[in-house]
Every structure is written in C-alpha cells, then in structure tokens.
Image: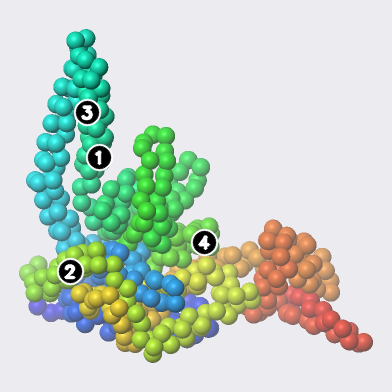
Amino acid sequence: MKRSRIKTFEQAPEGPKTLSVNKDIEPHSFPIASMPSKIRQLILEIANVTQTPAELASLCALAFAAGALGKGARMLTKESRRTPGNLMIAIGAPTGTGKSSVFDYLNKPIQKIQEEEQANWDSLKKPEIDANLYFLDLEIRKASKILSLQTSSFSEASNAQLKIKAAEKTKALLLNELKKRPRYVIEDCSNQQAEVIIANQTDNTILSASADAREVINNLLGRLSKEGHTGENLWLKLYSWEALVTDRITREAVSAKETCGSAIWLVQPDLITKLFSHEKMLDSGLVPRLLACNIHCDAGFIEYDAPGVPDSLTEDWEKLIRTLVAGRSKRITLTVSKSARVLMENWEKRWIDARNRGGEFYDIHGVVARWSENTWRIAVVLHLIEFPNAADGDEVSEETIEAAISIAKWMISRQLIIIEDGRRKKQVSELTVIKEVIAKFPNGITAREFMQQKKSMVNNNAKEATALLERHVSQGALQRVENKPDGGGHTEVRYKLKQ
C-alpha cells in the first residue's frame, strides 16, 4: 500500500505572523523529534494510518498520559514551588478529517482500565456493600420493633436506640461508598455531575476526554447558566489542584480537599476561536491555562485493506498508561538539573518585558503569564512518558526541558494565531476611542489627560493610560512628542495621531 508522508503544519496555511519578540516562535512545523522516543513511532504510525498531521496524535498522547498520571508527580521548579503535570488541551480540526480515529487509538487503554476496575467493583465491592446494607436494615427493623413494644424495659429500649443510631451511621457510610464506583474518564456531563464524580473518587482526580467536545466547550462558555456566568470555575480548580466545596439547594453538598484534572477536547475550529474571543476567559479565566490550537487537516484517502497501527505499539502504549495509573499513589517530586534550570529561567525571562506595561503582549499578559508554567507541566509529562517508573527525587534532564520548550513554542505560535484576530479588533476599537479623544486636544494629549477622559478604559490609572498609548505608538498609529522646557524641569510627553 502506498502511504503519503506524514502531514505536519508546514503543509497548511501559516496564518499571520504576530511576533517580533522572538522569531523562533513564529509559525513552524510541529517538533515531532521532541516527543519521547518511547511513543514517537506510535505517533507516526497513527498519523500515517489515519492520514492526519502528527501534531494531532502528539497532543492527544500528551493529554492522555497527563490524565493517567494524575497527581502521581510534580516538579520542584522553584525553591518552594512544585508544578504538577496535569494538562488541559483543546484542539480544533475540521469534521471528517480523522481526528476521532486518532483519539480512539490513544483513548483505549485508560477506558479499558476504567472498565476493568468498574467490573471488579460491580462483582466484588458492590455486592459486599449491598449485603451489609441488607443486614443493617434487618438490625434497624429488629431494634425498632423492641422500641415499639410496651413490654420493653427501659434498659432494652435504650439499647435498641443505641443500635439504631449506630446502624444508621454505618448505613450512611456504606451508602456513600456506593457512590465511589471507579472513574478515570468523563466525556459529556454537566459541571454538577462532574463535581459529584470527582468528589467520590479516591484521589479526586479525573480526565475529561471527548472527540466531540462541543457541549463541553458550550458549557464552559455559560450555556447552562441563566445569569450568563461562564462554567469554568470547576476547571480552574482542577488545573490548580484546589479544594472543591459546593452547596446546592437541590442536592447534598460536595467537597474534596485537593482535586486534579486533565483534559483533551477535540472540536470544530470555530469553537476554539470562540473560546479565545471571550474577553473574561481570556484575561483571567481558563483560556490562558489551556494548551489550544487549530490544526489544518486535509482529507486523506485510506485504502480499504490498509493495515492498522502495529499491535506491538498499541500494547506498549497500554503498558505505559497502566504504569502511570498504578504509580499515582507514589506522589513523587522530580528535581531539575542545573543546566535545565538555566534553560527554563532564560525561557521565562524572555517574556517579562513583553507582558509588562508598554510591552508587546501587555494586552494579553494573562495568557503570557501561563507560558512558562505550561512548559514546566509539559516537561513533567515528557519525563514520565520516558521514565514511567520514575522515583522521588529523580532529575529531569536538559534534553527534556529543551523538548518541552520546543513543544511550547509551537503551541504558543498556534495560540497567538487564534488570538490575533481578537487583538486586531480590540486594537481598532481602542484606536477609534483614542482618535475621538485626541480630536479634542489639537496639541496632542498626555497620558493623564487621556485617563481623565476615559477613566473606565484604563482603570483610572495613568500608567495604564501610558501603556495603552505607547502600544499604539509601537504599532505606528500614534507619535510620541517630548516637550522639554527651556529652563529645564519635567519633560512633558504628548501623543498625537501620526501624520
């Protein structure tokens, strides 16, 4: 059978080049060589068999590995900071281009583990709980009968009351145990349902995995909220390993001390764009924490008798996922070599000025703030894929950090392409307002004067006003004029429309 070469993004339209801070994160091909050697061949085979770009299988593999890992490992990234390895990945790709087939290959092992554990629970644990509940009900009925008899002595009645109280307490605990049927994966459920499932898992950990996550994304955007609130709060907690406590009138309270969640959501490209167009979620919500991209997939012809992915590769993938799941309870902390730490420090420093006032990315500083953290998280997953039996204190190599940075660069370039359209619209809107204000000041306007005119636009802050005006200077729409007094003193800065 003839097989076309593996598709990568270099075959797709590149989109606008939005970066000037660093050219090496402008749109480029997915760095397949940065994926762990243990799964690289599997990724290439899946891409070949499904006729999809290699980045689709790569990102799905990272997400499923992170979901299997759960709370199994963190990395000591700062003196007192331990960064986990859970990832939330959202991928947009057109319908009918094979994304579900890619998803299915990588989803099978964790689904299989879940089915096995549920079958074991159904055949052993549940019957035991049901039997104990049956005998407790008998005991309660027997004690209740003693209480109802007028011939019962005070001592007999007191003992019966104690037995009923103890039995009811034990019964409540057993009824709670009935809710703890093992779950590793959820697909399409409301946040309320997800909260109950997570709270009833032993480690309060879940993977949200869907090959058609339209409903999940719509729920995030607030489809189920009458007040128009977003549905991202649960996912923010899962990303950060926060406690979950919810009280609702219609059902019992839900609580968990430390939750953890990963996600792999495949959708149509329009929904990824819609997520990144939501100003609140982009500024401070879930969106900056997402590793999101739109992938260009051309439809490919697959012959009827084309072979599938070799069994040896899928079996190795299943062994890896089983090892990661089994190692969750170890809760190891990885360390970083000195040279690897220097690499990451340089990577982090690269964005400091760009995200501060006046910087190129100040308008999306919340997004930029998560770039280094997600790079650390990718590194945790890459290390555990390569060394699934890693022990506490194991050192992450410079090569792994380089690979994580390489993958992060690619993700950032994709992310910025999605964001760029919204940024352009916002900048046009800002410039319209600026022009209206400057029209009132023939000699130009100072940042303080702009702030006084448009307090809400710059949070009543002169520095915010300066950053806004300077950003439009750097984009060529405004010119900055410095007026130095003849006798010395403070230099006045005014902004005018560029002629």
Does the rendering let one see residue 101?
no
Q: Earlier in the sequence, mark 2 or mark 4?
A: 4
Q: CA distance from mark 2 to mark 4?
A: 35 Å
Where residue 164 appears, as percent x and y from the top left, is 23, 27
Q: Amino acid at mark 3?
A: Lys
Q: CA distance from mark 3 to mark 4?
A: 53 Å
Q: Is residue 475 left or right of residue 13?
A: right
Question: Mark 2 — residue?
Answer: 323
Residue nearest the observer in this picture, 91 or 75: 75
Q: Quadrant of residue 12?
A: bottom left
Q: CA distance from mark 3 to mark 1?
A: 16 Å
Q: Residue at x 39, y 88 (%)?
A: 338
Q: CA distance from mark 2 to mark 3?
A: 45 Å
Q: CA distance from mark 1 to mark 4?
A: 39 Å
Image height of 97 relative to 122, above or below = below
Where residue 87 appears, as percent x and y from the top left, is 34, 66
Give the mark toward the camera: 3 or 4.
3
Q: Earlier in the sequence, mark 2 or mark 3?
A: 3
Question: Mark 3 — residue?
Answer: 163
Q: Amino acid at mark 1?
A: Leu
